[in-house]
Image (spheres, helix red, strand yellow):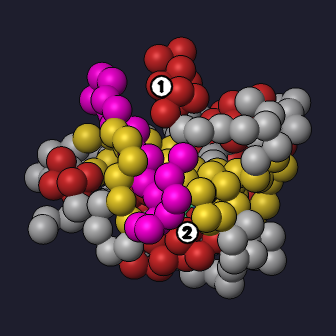
Amino acid sequence: MTRTAAPSLTAKDWNGLYASGKATPRLIGDGESRSAHSRLSLVRDMRAVDLGCGTGKWTRQLAAWGLDTIGLDFSQVALEQARAAVSHARYELWDIDSNATPGLLLPGSIDIVSCRLSFSFFDRSRLLPNARRWLTPRGQLYILTNVTDPHAGNLSPFECGMSEEEIGSLGSDGWHVRDVFRFNRRVGIVLQPSGSPGP
Ligand SMILES: C[S@@+](CC[C@H](N)C(=O)[O-])C[C@H]1O[C@@H](n2cnc3c(N)ncnc32)[C@H](O)[C@@H]1O
């Protein structure tokens, strides 16, 4: 399978993009929030982590739905901007690919692991088994991604994503796809660990 190349950006690169205003988070439309809310089985006070949260727009949406939400990102600048907005969401600095797992991610402790426009940047061979470990028995991994042509060159950081082939390959290796929904050129995917009791 050809894996779509996400630009290889360091935390320093992302800091520069956020500081200059060049990393402009995409707005969260009503369609996106409504679709995600209706497809994820959400219950107040569930614990959620938003990986690669950037300036925290989606993290705040999860918190506004009553979830106990922590946003994690390796860009200090993005997190400063996230913390400036009023919300119950909390934020922590973490390099998801390289640093040790923070203590808050105990096995079986998280109901929703969310990756909005961030999954394609992470090392999947590390993240997917980790996410399976962190999730509660009915926990869900939510991915929102752009659908991209694997041969498209020079996409901006907010345009890159996954090819149809990569999206189709997600329901393997210990996961099953509970739901997929499409709008514009994006796909939302809800995954659960194989053998989990369902919603
Ligand atoms: C395209 S942005 C999406 C931001 C946010 N989720 C949104 O929807 O606006 C991708 C984010 O992933 C973060 N990121 C990329 N690699 C990371 C890593 N290894 N550890 C933590 N965060 C990372 C970047 O700093 C950036 O904020």
Report the amino acid beneath label 2.
Ala
Location of the N terminus by quadrant is bottom left
Q: Position of residue 124 (x, y in %)?
A: 40, 71
Judging from the image, what secondary structure is the residue with disc 2 in? helix
Residue at screen point 39% across, 78% down? 125
Residue, x 43% and y 42% (percent of image)?
144
Residue wearing tag 2:
131
Categorize mark 2 by other alpha carbons within 10 Å: few (<14), some (14-19), many (20+): many
Residue 97 in the image, given as x and y percentages of width and height: 53, 76
Residue lying at 44% horizontally and 47% vertically, measured from the top left: 190
Q: CA distance from mark 1 to mark 2?
A: 22 Å
Amino acid found under the numbered disc labelled 1 = Ser
Q: Residue furthest front?
A: 197
Asked whether, in this view, residue 84 is left or right of residue 145, the answer is right
Q: Which residues are magenta?
A: 181-199
Judge from the rendering whether residue 47 lies leftward or rightward of residue 75; answer left or right. right
Q: Which mark is residue 35?
A: 1
